[in-house]
Image (cartoon, rainbow, N blue to C red):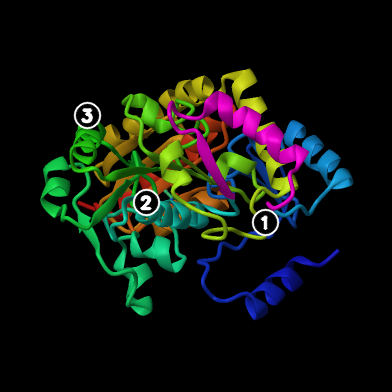
Amino acid sequence: MVKREEVIRLEDRWIAPVFQRRPIVAVRGRDAILWDADGREYVDCMAGYGAAFLGHCHPRVVEAVKAQAEKLLACHGSVYAEARAELLRRLELIAPEGLGRVFLSNSGAEAVEFALKAARKYTGKREFIAMVRGFHGKTMGALSATWNPKYRASFEPLLAGVRFVPYGKAEKVEEAITSDTAAVIVEPIQGEGGVYVAPEGYLAQLREICDRHGIVLIFDEIQTGFGRTGKLFAYQHWNVVPDIICLAKAAGSGVPIGITLAKNEILESLSIGEHSSTFSGNPLACAAASATIDVLIEGRLWERAERLGKLFKGFLSRLAEKYRVVREVRGLGLMLAVEYRFDILDVLQGLLQRGVIALSSGTRILRFLPPVSITEDQIEYVAAKLEECTEIMERERLKS
Ligand SMILES: *Cc1c(COP(=O)(O)O)cnc(C)c1O
């Protein structure tokens, strides 16, 4: 076994220095708990950036992956595969109405790449409208629709003809439309941008605008999909169905998979060779996704996410009432954020020292993407530790 210090040395030596590191060497995970190389345990409210929504190493997923690994690991999309068909049978049950075709890939960014290409192909138009604070991934196409200048600046020129408009204002989308607009891409709840929930009526207005102008409406549900927000998919909160939906993160419970579901006519506009990927519909990824969907559906786990999310958000909202350093609490289900008035680096580190892993968004927003298998006790534990850290910030920042 490689020692903790050696793991850190090797990773720091070899991996491109693009990750903001935490001083944890992860060894093992189960449900909402992650163990590090020193045997310390953490309540993991990052959980693979939302990938381990069922909890780390859900036994049904582990079993499915093991069984598939013994049968077939490599199968290109040009050969039919049983494991792929198994996943399609499940997608048939859960796909939004009218989205009857799919392209399978390996990541969120790839799911977005394909959505953008499909929208161009189908409409014959080139431009996209994306949102301020929107996040869609970091490959060149997806990055072109990602707003944050910090991610974009060094890599320009990106795709020409992407216009960014403020999130939540449908009239701004309408103003940005040209005769060459192919698609509007939007997150029903902005994740990386800081957990901003679509205002009431917004998505319905976008649907109406896109219909009126013959523009493809793309929902990026890579973070919100598969139960996280209290519905199987976040669009169900507003009953607005897009033309294309992008999924990834929780889809494979940690095994890489991207899923782009679209209307038949959109994907039927593509012809052989216009898009593909060696690992598209990979049997291992399909087996993991099938097991994930089974567990979600059988347990109706989005309902648990809603219930636990309310409990969690209740604790966070009490903090907001009690401490002036807390500016706002946002989110739906188990996708939650606390915005502070000051830099949260100390809060993140304080939580880590107290056995809680959380995420940040920018410098002042703390985010939680816990697994749905988190217990009420663990939520209370996280809330108590967060209160300790918030109290310290309040004392230090607001000495009066
Ligand atoms: C994470 C994320 C992506 C990118 O997914 P990757 O698998 O990291 O490429 C795209 N869109 C949203 C909304 C995401 O949260």
In front: label 3 or label 1: 1
Tell me, yes or no, whether the two marked residues, 2 and 3, touch with CB atoms within 8 Å: no
Of the pair 389 and 63, the residue shown nearer to us: 63
Gap between marks 1 and 2, in whole Å?
22 Å
Q: Residues within 10 Å of mark 1 (few under 14, many from 20)?
A: some
Gap between marks 3 and 1, in whole Å?
39 Å
Tell me, yes or no, whether the two marked residues, 3 and 1, touch with CB atoms within 8 Å: no
Relative to residue 336, is residue 22 drawn left or right?
right
Work out whether residue 270 can be spotted: yes
Q: Earlier in the sequence, mark 1 or mark 2?
A: 2
Q: Residues within 10 Å of mark 3 (few under 14, many from 20)?
A: few
Q: Please identify the quarter of the rendering in which residue 10 is found.
A: bottom right
Gap between marks 2 and 3, in whole Å?
26 Å
Three-letter code for the amino acid on which mark 1 is drawn: Phe
> Does the residue tagged 2 have its C-beta within 8 Å of any atom of ligand 1?
no
In the rendered image, which residue does mark 2 sit on?
119
Q: Residue at x 19, y 43 (%)?
A: 213
Three-letter code for the amino acid on which mark 3 is drawn: Glu
Circle 3 sits in a helix, a strand or a loop, which is it?
Answer: loop
Label annotation for residue 362 = none
In the rendered image, which residue does mark 3 sit on?
200
Relative to residue 166, is residue 266 drawn left or right?
right
Of the pair 384 and 85, the residue shown nearer to us: 85
Q: Residue at x 37, y 50 (%)?
A: 122
Q: Which residues are magenta?
A: 77-104
Q: Earlier in the sequence, mark 2 or mark 3?
A: 2
In front: label 1 or label 2: 2
In the rendered image, which residue does mark 1 sit on?
279
Q: Is residue 29 above or below residue 85?
A: below
Circle 1 sits in a helix, a strand or a loop, which is it?
Answer: loop
